[in-house]
Image (cartoon, rainbow, N blue to C red):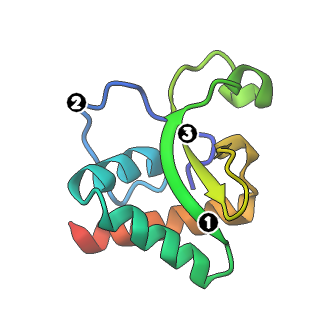
Amino acid sequence: MGKNNISKNDLSNVYVNPHDMNSVVTIYLHGDKEFPQDFRKKIVDSMKEINYELSNIGVDSNPDSFHLDPDFRGVNGLMLYVEEKNIRTKMFQPQISQGMFRALSIIIHLFSMSTS
């Protein structure tokens, strides 16, 4: 579902394939760019419906990526992050549980395909 995939910092000429299950970061960025308010809100609201109490979602460089997971060491790319209700710390891809990340990935893909 793309948990071990990140995106490069320059996305100006990137082709977005909404059917590629490993491109969740790029797909999220494309949807957020096309629909800046609605895309993020729909994802957060959908995650709440399945009992993941998120207050925010986004993409950023993870300053701690060198220390978290061998798959991410030495990579200065972009990763998905979530912020849970009552916790204002960004939780990046390596820190997100596999279940939450799968749900998040599926929801991002569904909204991406419904808006394209």
Please state the horizontal and vertical placement of residue 29, each as a whole percent of the image. 36, 47
Mark 3: amino acid: Asn
Mark 2: amino acid: Ser
The label nearer to you, 2 versus 3, is 2
Please state the horizontal and vertical placement of residue 49, each as a whole percent of the image. 58, 84
In the picture, which quadrant includes the C terminus?
bottom left
Q: Is residue 78 left or right of residue 38?
A: right
Where disc 1 sits, the SS reads strand
- Tag 1 or tag 2, which sits nearer the N-term? 2
Q: Residue at x 44, y 47 (%)?
A: 23
- Residue beneath label 2, please? 12
Please state the horizontal and vertical placement of residue 12, each as a whole percent of the image. 22, 30
The label nearer to you, 2 versus 1, is 1
Image quarter of residue 7: top left
Q: Residue at x 76, y 57 (%)?
A: 97
Q: Residue at x 72, y 62 (%)?
A: 86
- Tag 1 or tag 3, which sits nearer the N-term? 3
- Residue beneath label 1, please? 54
Please state the horizontal and vertical placement of residue 59, each as a whole percent of the image. 48, 42
Q: Is residue 72 left or right of residue 11?
A: right
Image quarter of residue 83: bottom right
| Residue 83 shows in the view | yes
| Residue 17 shows in the view | no
Which residue is more in the foreground, 106 or 30? 30
Q: CA distance from mark 3 to mark 1?
A: 22 Å
- Residue beneath label 3, please? 5
In the rendered image, the vertical position of residue 48 relative to residue 97, given as above or below = below
Which residue is more in the foreground, 108 or 4? 108
Mark 1: amino acid: Leu
* Classed neighbour count for the residue bearing mark 2: other residues with Cα under 10 Å, few (<14), some (14–19), many (≥20): few
